[in-house]
Amino acid sequence: MVTADRRAEAVGRHVQVLAESGEALHAPRLLRYEVANAITRKIVAGEIDTADASRGWRQIVAMPIVLHELDDGPAAIGIALRLRRESAYDAAYVALAQELDAELLTLDGPLARNAASIDLPVRLLQV
């Protein structure tokens, strides 16, 4: 949404529908670092400028997302290993979804497929 990716409009509508329906949005505190990283990559690639980055950052900060600390590192590590990932970043989102008895919505096709194959609460957003 921040970087005007081709999927941004559809994701924005989905988030708006969730918020309007009273669904709370949750993410690991890691979310803001990942957004900052994505914005940095887009600037370096010449896809956006710093004004776009600032505007996008304000959008993210304004979103009603409850941010959570990672309290159960071993759970995230275990999920990462089950997903056959070398990083626990995605697993932190899955672990939070499990902790909240919720479903993780993602645009990451491989994550959704791998998670579905081992019965984790992850759904691919169709955009």
Image: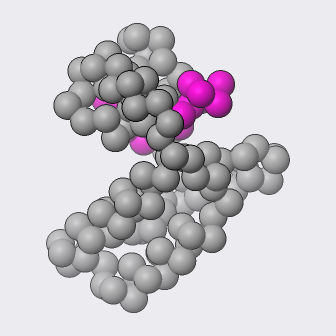
Q: Quick check: 120 left or right of 86?
A: right
Q: Quick check: 15 left or right of 37?
A: right
Percent position of residue 4, x then y: 42, 68
For the point 63% across and 71% down, the residue is: 62
Magenta part of the chain: 96-111
Is residue 90 highlighted in magenta?
no
Percent position of residue 28, x then y: 50, 46
Q: 3 or 63, which is in the foreground?
A: 63
Q: 76 or 25, which is in the foreground?
A: 76
Residue at the farthest top position: 118
- For the question of whether residue 104 can be seen, the reply is no
Percent position of residue 22, x then y: 81, 47
Q: Quick check: 64 left or right of 68?
A: right
Residue at the farthest bottom position: 51
For the point 25% across and 76% down, the residue is: 43
Residue 107 falls in image quadrant: top left
